[in-house]
Image (tube, rainbow, N blue to C red):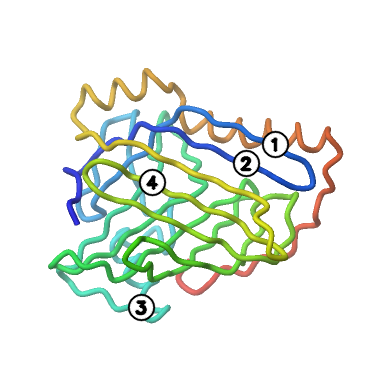
Amino acid sequence: MNLPLLPAVVPGRVSHTRRVPLRHRFAYRTYQWLVDVDDLPRHGVLASFSPADHLGSADCTLRDNVAAFTAMHGVVLEPDDRVVMLANARSLGYVFDPLSVFWCFTSTGELRCVVLEIHSTYGERHAQLARPDTTGRFQLDKEFYVSPFFTMHGRYDVLLRLDDQRVAVAIDLTQAEHRVFSAAFSGRPRPARTMAVVAAALRTPLVTYQVWALIRLHGIRLWLRRLPVIPRPPHIPPKGV
């Protein structure tokens, strides 16, 4: 696998498509970060990363937290393994990261596993471990209440791509054998030199605030269209989250 030069900013587009019981779609420009968790970049107020913003203990390193989570779920990382994260950075004092993806590679570049960490607008977080096939595909049971308009049953069909030309995440939610929702991000990684970081911030200003606002805006639109709200059950995070 040809990984891009890290750290990298990944300008791209995110899209959401809801198919039932009414159709609703949106897409917008954004950017994310692709980083080695052992070499986290810092760009002042424009971008920083903290273990407190992700799974595990705020008192440990992000690498240690990922390794602890994978070990609890059956995959032991070796000291020379590499962990690459796709996520939003804390910017201008705030971060909201609906989905972080951690790729865990052996020292020879083979993929051991991936970890998907999900954050909800209710302040809860959840993570699941998966072992993609050679095409980057895998399935996960739906275990976390994310949208107030979907029940807890169903499965996610996930496709990941990570190389020096493209970073992409595509997720379909299937319920009762019908694909009811799709979300995707795709972008081209660029080395996170100062000018590239500033350009991304100017092209999509207040990016993490934008993510927070758009989720709420589209939720209000769906509510005004009288889409039924599903009660939120208590959430018990998995071990290591």
Q: Earlier in the sequence, mark 3 or mark 1?
A: 1
Image coordinates for residue 167, horizontal then vertical, percent: 33, 45
Distance Cα–Cα, label 4 vs label 3: 26 Å
**Do the residues under discs 1 and 2 have CB atoms within 8 angstroms?**
yes
Assign a secondary structure to mark 1. strand
Assign a secondary structure to mark 3. helix
Instruction: Give the total of numbered labels.
Output: 4
User: Does residue 186 lie above or below 120 as drawn?
Assistant: above
Q: Circle 2 sits on which residue?
A: 17
**Do the residues under discs 4 and 2 have CB atoms within 8 angstroms?**
no
Three-letter residue code for mark 3: Ala
Assign a secondary structure to mark 2. strand
Q: Circle 4 sits on which residue?
A: 168
Q: Circle 3 sits on which residue?
A: 71
Three-letter residue code for mark 2: Thr
Seen at 23% across and 34% down, the residue is 190
Residue 153 is drawn in which quadrant? bottom right
Q: Of residues 6 and 38, which is closer to you in this image?
A: 6
Seen at 26% across and 67% down, the residue is 111
Distance Cα–Cα, label 1 vs label 2: 6 Å
Seen at 26% across and 54% down, the residue is 37
Distance Cα–Cα, label 3 vs label 1: 39 Å
Q: Circle 1 sits on which residue?
A: 24
Q: Looking at the rendering, in which quadrant would you find the N terminus?
A: bottom left
Could you tell whether 35 is left or right of 66 in the image?
A: left
Residue 179 is drawn in which quadrant? bottom right
Distance Cα–Cα, label 2 vs label 3: 35 Å
